[in-house]
Image (spheres, rainbow, N blue to C red):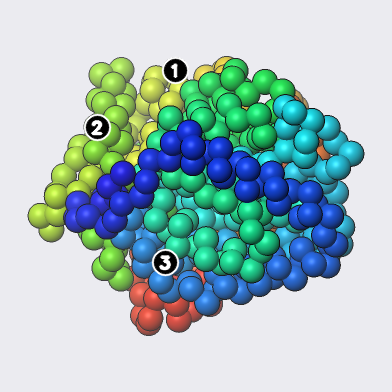
Amino acid sequence: MKITNPATLAPLGEVPESGVDDIHRTMAAAGAAARAWHATTGACRAELLKQIGSRVRESARDLAELSTEESGLARCESLDCVRAAAAIFDFYATHAAAGGAGRAGNAGDRRGEGDDGSLGTVAVFAPFSLPLPVMAASVGRALAEGLSVVYKPPAENPLTSLALASAFDGLPAGVVNLVTGGPAVGRLLLAHPGVGQILFTGSAAVGLEIAAVARGKRLDLEVGTVDAHIVCRGVDLDLAVPAIAWTRLMNGGQSRLSGGHLYVERSLAAEFVDRMHHCVGFLDVDDPCRPCTDLGPLISHEAAVKLEDQVGRTLRAGAKLILGGRRFRPSGLPGHFFQPTILTDVKPGSVPMREQLLGPVITVTPMADLAEALRLWKEFSSPWALSPATASIYTADADAAAGAVEAMPDGFFRINDPSVGDLGPLGGLHHRGIRNALGTVADESRNRPTKRVEMSRTIERRPWWFPYIDRSGGPLDAHPPSEARAS
């Protein structure tokens, strides 16, 4: 499989398409290591996990540069992801030392066993969007609980995961294993009888396929529906607009962990869209290797074509185009670039409410009030969502918003974008594995609706918001996110 730079289309390297024999050898290695690794003490696992975190930090600059080249992430975002991965491994070191609860499975929980009754290996699948912190959350949790792992990096951008794998060199052979390839490799891994648990982040369609074929295995599927950003009257737009712009457009708008559709109270919708136009219209779209670039390319040609089709269908349904709307070539680059786009007057039930738009597209539906926004969000949420969606509410009256969501049966609700944990820009993302690493999950059960409300009285300006020129004043790894200068 040839891997290319999505901005320049320059070749970066090749990885093998693993076959049946590769999967059998990998699973044999994981199975051989499983019993001894499960028998190690929590203190031993903790020390090894701390070493992994340290090795990731030592390689942070090289890993971030590679991530930018193969994923199209802005340079500072790549470094944020590497630092978050290191911090998550540190967390699980503490978790292992404390002998934490067996969220990844334990010897007394037979749902974590393979089909043959042996201690099952954990199969981890991460998305092309932010694969390093998602991988760290899944692999770190399994290691802390004494389980062996087989990890398949995303087919679109596996090189950074392969480079990070050297951080696992201190572990016993076979405890962490990597296989590369596309969907066929994933199906081989899913079908293997030695796999006892599957950790997957990605699309609902693939999640449903996994749920259908992986009977008898323990599933932890992070796939959901379209999230909501709800803007209520009286809110400070000087803060709400840049907060939403960054949350929606980080990673070029491709993150399944931070995307969503906007509902804005009708009385301030026109002003909100005008301010968002000014904010988004001046973002720097270019080669992400440039230190001042805000938005890089989409991950692939197919992703760009799909996004253009979604925008077109939304316009044909009656939405109004304010900005952008198509592929383009900034600085003459041949890669998979999409214009920053704003669509308003999006009709209820149209594409942005039902499908995730993975790209730099902000879609707005004016609504009467918070109650109507919550009703529309739930009404058009995907019926096949396998994990709760998130509604981020921006309001001058946090108590009233908390009262409004009290009647909602499930979902994660973030009022005024409260910070979570100490992972800097990625601390607020709602991926279950990252939430576990931050200790914020209220319901310990799996694969059933959960509910959580996180609230701040006011919106707090974050130092990692756009424009990224404010984070480009020194070497790539000079300043951690918490020390970055606010715009």
Residue under the point 28% across and 41% down:
300
Image quadrant occupied by the N terminus: top left
Q: Is residue 451 left or right of residue 88?
A: right
Question: Could you tell me the amino acid type at mark 3?
Answer: Ala
Q: Which of these two is toward me, 271 or 55?
A: 55
Closer to the chain start, of discs 3 and 2, is: 3
At label 3, counting other C-alpha atoms closer than 10 Å, the crowd grade (few under 14, some 14-19, many 20 or more) is many
At label 1, counting other C-alpha atoms closer than 10 Å, the crowd grade (few under 14, some 14-19, many 20 or more) is some
* Residues at circles 1 and 3 in contact by the CB criterion of under 8 Å: no
Q: What element carries label 3?
A: helix
Q: Whole-percent x and y of residue 28?
A: 63, 43
Q: Whole-percent x and y of residue 183?
A: 43, 31
Looking at the image, residue 40 lies above or below residue 152: below
User: In this figure, which residue is indicated by the disc labeled 1?
Assistant: 349
| Real-space CA distance between mark 1 and mark 3, rounded to the nearest whole angstrom | 39 Å
Q: Is residue 157 left or right of residue 236?
A: left
User: In this figure, which residue is indicated by the disc labeled 2?
Assistant: 305
Residue under the point 43% across and 40% down:
18
Question: Could you tell me the amino acid type at mark 1?
Answer: Gly
Q: Which is in the foreground here, disc 1 or disc 3?
A: 3
Q: Whole-percent x and y of residue 311?
A: 28, 29
Q: What element carries label 2?
A: helix
| Real-space CA distance between mark 1 and mark 2, rounded to the nearest whole angstrom | 22 Å
Q: Whole-percent x and y of residue 168?
A: 59, 63
Looking at the image, residue 66 lies above or below residue 178: below
At label 2, counting other C-alpha atoms closer than 10 Å, the crowd grade (few under 14, some 14-19, many 20 or more) is some
User: In this figure, which residue is indicated by the disc labeled 3?
Assistant: 64
Question: Could you tell me the amino acid type at mark 2?
Answer: Val
